[in-house]
Amino acid sequence: MTVDGKYANLVATVKEECKDASEEEIAEEFRRYEEEFLIPPEDALRSVIRKFQTIAGIDVTGSSSARAPPPSAKKVDRFADLGSDDRNVTVEVAVVSYTPRMQKMKNGEERQIAFGWIEDNPWESSDKRERWDYKDWGGHSQNLAPGSVVRLEGVSVNEWNDKKSININRTSRISVLREGGQANPERTDEPISIEKASQSDGFVNIVARVLSTKNDVIVKRDGSGQLNVVRGRLADETGSIGMLSWSEFDHEPGTLLKIEGASIRRFRDTPEVNIGDTTRVEVYHDNSFASMDELASTKKSTISGLRNGMRDVEITLQVESWYKRSFTAKDGSERIVRSGDVMDPTGRCRLTAWCDFDPKPGDFIHLNEARVQSWQGSPDLVIDDISQATNLESPTWEKIDPDDHWVNVGLTELVAGGTRRGIRTKGSIVLVTGDSGIIERCTVQLQDRDRKCRKRLRDGVCVDCGPQRGEEDLRIRMVLDDGISNVSLLLSKEPAEHFLGMTQAEVSEMISREGQDFFLSSVREKALGRSVSVNGLALIDDQGAMLLADSVQDDGMSASTAAEKAIERWEVVM
Amino acid sequence: MESRRAPRQTAIRMLAQEYSDASLTEMGTGEFDPSFVITKLGARVNRALVAGVIDRLERRDGDNGPSYSGHIRDPTGNHVFNIAPFQEEMHAEAEELLARFESGDRFLISLVGKARWFETEDGGVFTSLRVEQLAIIDKERYSRWLVDAAEATLRRMKAYEDSEGLEAEATTLANGGIPKDVAEGMAQARSHYPEFDLENYRVGVLQALSIASGRSSMAEAELEMSRSQLRVDDQGIESPETKAPIEPAGDISATIIRAIESADGGQGAEYDSIILACVQSGFSREDAEDAIEGMRDVDGTIIEPRFGFFQVL
C-alpha cells in the first residue's frame, strides 16, 4: 500500500469538507501527524480538516462534526433568520462596502481577503435593513462592488463575541442582481497620489505632508463615552485631503509621512483618509517633495470644487447679497441667521453665517475652516464663528458683475463634477419630452412652511395632498447634448416663455385649439438640433445630471462663423 | 443606496457616409443593455443626431400597422431612417411629412434616432436609424449641424491617426491620448476593420465645411435639385461615396430577377437581400430601390405578396 493509498479514505473525507485542497497535501499532512506528531490518522482527522478549512477560509468555529453530511442549503430573506452555525446559506444582500486587505496565511503566503458591510432586504429602503459584517475569503472582489445587490449562495455564518457575521468562501457563488459602482480595484502596495486616493475606496498607501492637525472628540452614539481623535489635512502636489486618525497622531504640520494601509471613507461626498490601529505611519524623507509653501495653494478651494461634507475649507469670495433673519429655535430661544450669495471666478453659491458677520455686497472676504453643507443639492458654505471670516481690504480679482456672472463650463466637465450654480454651458437640443407644456400644480398650503405644495398633479391628483383643482404652470423638459455628454434640461415658466416667444396663456390657448401634439411639434421645430447656450443651475447627484435653466438662447454663433472656426481649429486646408 | 439610472446614450454627430460604411455591430446582452453600431472611425453609435434634405419617404402597410422609411441626404450620402408601426405617436407627423413629400415638396429635416441594422445571410450589414424625434429645420440650423458633424468626424479622424501603432485596447488607447469617449469604439474598430484611407472621409468633411462656411452653395443646390426632382449625376457634385464601387454589371432588372430567383425558397426573397445583390453587382442602393419599385408598380414583373418579400410573377 502506498502512503497515499493508506490515507485514501481519510483524504476523501477531508476533500468533502475542503474541496479546493490538494490530495497530496492532505496525505502529506496525515503523514506528518502520524510520523512527526505521532498521532494516528483517525485521531488527526479533525485537526487536518480544520487546517485545510482555515487555509481555504472556511469558518471553523462551528461545532459540526467532520463526519456529518454536508448541511443542506438554507435560503433566507433576513439575517434575523440565521443561526450561528448555519452553513450553505443563500441570501440576497446589498453590498455597502468592500475593503481588501493582504493577509499572511500560516504557510507564509500572502492572500488578498476583504471585509465590509452587507445589508439584508436589499430591495427595501435602508431603514428596513439589517447590516452585518462579512469577510470575503474567496477573492470575489469583482462581484462585490459597493452599491450592488447580489445573491450569495453557499456562504456561512460566523459568530464571535456574540456578533454574527457572514463568511464568503472560495466555493461560494455570487450572482450580481443589480450593478453597483465601479468594480473593486485590485489592491496595490505602491503609494498613490492624493488625487487618485480621493477617487478610490478602501485601503491605500500615500506619501503626504501634514498641513494641519487639530485634536477633536467624537461622542459615541450609544452614549458609552467618547473617543479622542485627531483631524487634519494632508497634501501632495496633486491636491489635499482631510484626515481622521483614530489612534495617536502627534506629527507636527510640515512633517512628511508615509502612510500605509489607511482607509478612504466618505463623509457625504467628501473622501477622508482614516488612520487606525492597523495603519502604519512613519516619517518619510524626500527632499524633492513639495514644501509647505508650495502646498499652501492645494488647501485653497474654489466654488466649483466645493462638495457636500467638506470641512476645513479655505476660500476667497466676493459678496453679492447679504440678509439677516431671526427665527425661534426648537428650544424656544430667538436666533439669528445671516446668509447671502457669494461668488468667485468659478461660480457662485450661498454662504450661511451662524455668527455676527455682516459684510456688504461687493466686499471681498476670506474664509478659513468653513464647512460645506448641501441645501437642495447645491453645496453651500457655512461658518459658525466670526474668527473664520476676514474682510479683505483690497479686491482679489477684478470685481465680478453679479448680473452677468455665468461661468462657462463644458458639458462633460459639468456632468462629471458636482452641483454648481451660475454656470453657462452649450450643446444641441436632442429631445423635447411629450409632457412638456401646461401642467397643473398642487395649491395646498404646506403647514409649517411658507409655501404651497406645488407638486405636479397627475389626472387631477397630487400624490401627497389628494384630488383637487390645480394651478396651471408652464414647463418644458428637453435633453441637451454636445455629442460627448448629455444632461436633462428643465425650463420653468419664465425661461420657457422666453424660449418659445409665447406667454403661458398663448401656449394654453394653442394647446386647447390645436392639441398637445401640434404644440409639441412646434416646440420641436424650434428646438430640435438647435445649438443653444444655457444659463442656470446644474444639479448633479446619484440620479444623474439636470440643468435648471435661467435662460436658453442661441449660442450666438452663425453657421458660417462656426465653420470658419472649425477650419481654423482643425487646420483644414480648403 | 439608490440605484443609478442607466445613463442616457449621447447622440453621435456623423455624416451619412461614416454610418453607411459601418459593418460592426454590438448587440446588448441584457434586456436593457444598449446596442451599438461601431463605425470605422470608432464612433459607438447607439443614438445619433443627423440632418439633411429629405430624399425619399414612403409608407408600408403591414399587419401591425403602417411603417415609414425614408432617406435624408447630406453631402456624403444618405441616412436611412424608419418609423416603426408601434411608434404610433409619430404616425400623424409622418403622414404630414409624406403628404408634403408626395406633393413634390422637399425640405431639410433634423432627426434623432436609435441605431438599427439589418444583416443579410451572407453577412452584409445595412445600418439605419429608428426615429425618436424629427423636425423640419431651416438652412442655418442644418449648416450648424454640418459643422458639428464635420468637427466630430475630424476629431475621430485624428483619434484614428493617433491610434496608429498602439495596441487596439481601450485602456491603452485612452492612455495614448485618444479621447475617453472614443477609445473603446476605436479599439473595436481597429480590431474589426482592415486598414483604410481617411481620404474619403476628409472629402466629406471638406464638403460639409465648405457648404456651412458659405464658400459653396451646395446646401442650396442640393435642396433645389431635389425640389425639381432632378437626380444629381455621377460626374456632377455628387459625393464620391454614392458612386458605384465598381462598374455596374449588366441590367439592373435582370440582376433583381436573378436575386429573387436564387433566394426565393417559396416564401419570396427579402427586400434587403435583393438590394444587397444589386449593390454587390455595382448598382447604387437608390437605383436598386427605384428599380424594384418600378418593376413592382409599373412593369408588374415582380410582386410583393408579403411586406418586404418579393417574387417573380
Image (spheres, grey):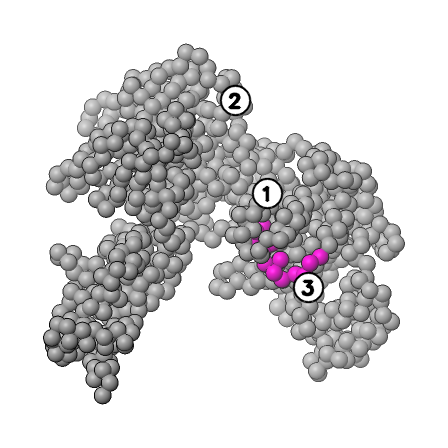
- Provide residue A193's location: percent of width, then percent of height: 40, 40
- Of helix, strand and loop, which one carries label 3? strand
Is A245 in front, or is A49? A49
User: Badge 2 is on which residue?
Assistant: A403
Is A10 in front, or is A70? A10
Q: CA distance from mark 1 to mark 3?
A: 26 Å
Q: Which kind of residue does numbered mark 1 sit on?
A: Asp
Determine whether, in the image, residue A269 is placed left or right of residue A471: left
- Of helix, strand and loop, which one carries label 1? loop
| Above or below: residue B191 compared with residue B73 | below
- Provide residue B243's location: percent of width, then percent of height: 81, 58
Which residue is found at the position 82% from the left and 52% from the top? B238
Q: Which residues are magenta?
A: B181-196
Q: Are marks 1 and 3 in contact (CB under 8 Å)?
A: no
Q: Which kind of residue does numbered mark 3 sit on?
A: Phe
Query: What's the magenta bit mostly, secondary-structure-wise?
Result: helix
Residue B126's disc is: 3
- Of tags 1 and 2, which is closer to the observer? 1
- Residue B188 within the segment the image draws in magenta: yes
Which residue is found at the position 64% from the left and 71% from the top? B63
Disc 3 chain ID: B
Q: Quadrant of the C terminus of chain B?
A: bottom right
Name the N-terminal-most of marks 1 and 2.
Answer: 2
Residue A482's disc is: 1
Q: CA distance from mark 2 to mark 3?
A: 52 Å
Which residue is found at the position 75% from the left and 80% from the top? B262
> Which of the 4 quarters of the picture holds residue A302?
top left
> Which of the 4 quarters of the picture holds residue A73?
bottom left
| Above or below: residue A30 compared with residue B45 | below
- Provide residue B304's location: percent of width, then percent of height: 74, 74
